[in-house]
Image: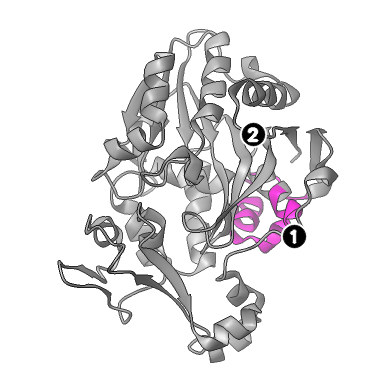
Amino acid sequence: MTAKVSIARCGNYEFERVMAAVRRSVDLVGGIGGVVKPGAKVLLKPNLLSARLPEEGVDTNPEVVRAVVRLVKEAGASSIDIGDSPGGYRKNTDEVFEMSGMKRLAEEEGVGIVKFNSSRNIDGFPVSRHVLDADCVISIPKFKTHGITTLTAGVKNMFGALTGLYKARCHSKAPREEDFAKILAKVYAIARPDLTVLDAVVAMEGDGPSGGDLRSTGFVMASSDAVAIDAVLAKLVGLEPLDLAVTKTCYEDGSGEADLAKIELAGDSIDSFMMPDFKLPQTKILKMIPRAIINKAASLVKFKPVIDDQICKRCNLCKLTCPVHAITIEADRCAINYKKCVRCLCCDEVCPYGAISIKRNILAKMVWR
């Protein structure tokens, strides 16, 4: 299998710059006309994790989505919808669309907003009907780190094609990276997008996907193969593509290309975007320790989510999201039952107020240094 990945420089989210970069990146991999036919019903699937403002860098920036909307209009689509299944599982979906800027964007551009509330069962997965019924699906992920998968970008974005609380149950059934990667690979194979346009103008490093540090990375990518995009991103941050369990699983399943020798790069030189000092999540250190040692010493190197009572707004999103019902939210206390907690970090992902952080024990801090 061969794949083509384009990369186009984009220094900030000023729309004219974004439009030029998105157009160039898409043109370099065959053009929008290659995926959107006149009269097509098109679904745009950004990464809308939680109700955060665009400048917080948690969700796909609306200007990148706007640029894709403009291209799809030029291709003659009959309808365009923006949709996702945000963290929080329906409780605050309207707030997510509002805060992220997607609602305003949709109104300004005259396109639709759809909630992934209905599904069809495909191989045991409740996949959104909006995803399945579209003539063309364009994924618009955000480049961030992730506590379980190390990076989240092309493949991981399509996990949002699943509806309701099933995503939480996936975390409960598969808390280990290797097992979760198998689920992500299956969902990607079912709901594979026709095109992926990556927002990497500003990325998130460190403890993403919601509590990390923003970093200006200055580019957008495009490809019909999201696995290839993730493989190139791994190279950019100093990893081997197959270091990422999701990429490795997809590659072995034949869902995409991860061999860099078989990925054709187009556009700006990849060397100018290399980030050897890119900060990976704290949880990455466990994956760097040999399995035999982890099996004996995992209990000594610990990470856990902690709720700050003073910051918490008692919105209960973390409680609703927790796949093992380990969280208690009350007026006078917030607590996590660590005997139940599977360290999936879903609570940290969905908290819109930054009230949940990841704490390390002394040994973990020593290993991290």
Residue 53 covered by magenta stretch: no
- In terms of secondary structure, where does tag 1 sit? loop
Is the residue 40 above or below the residue 323 in the image?
above
Callout 2 secondary element: loop
Report the residue marked by disc 1.
240
Q: What amino acid is found at the position of numbered circle 2 in the picture?
A: Asn
Quadrant housing residue 265: top right
Decide whether residue 258 is among the magenta residues.
yes
Q: Which residues are magenta?
A: 233-259
Q: Position of residue 205 (x, y in %)?
A: 60, 56
Residue 245: x and y in percent read: 60, 61
Q: How is the image coloured?
A: one colour
- Residues 58 and 309: in front is 309
Q: Are marks 2 and 1 in contact (CB under 8 Å)?
A: no
Residue ID for mark 2: 12
Q: Residues within 10 Å of mark 2 (few under 14, many from 20)?
A: some
Considering depth in this image, is 8 or 250 the residue closer to the camera? Answer: 8
Residue at 78% from the left image edge and 45% from the top image edge:
273
Residue at 27% in and 55% down: 317
Q: How many marks?
A: 2
Question: Which residue is at a point 35% across and 51% down the rendered structure image?
Answer: 352
**Which residue type carries mark 1?**
Glu
Residue at the front extreme of this rendering = 310
| Residue 288, position as x, y percentages in the image | 66, 75
Q: Can the viewer see residue 128?
A: no
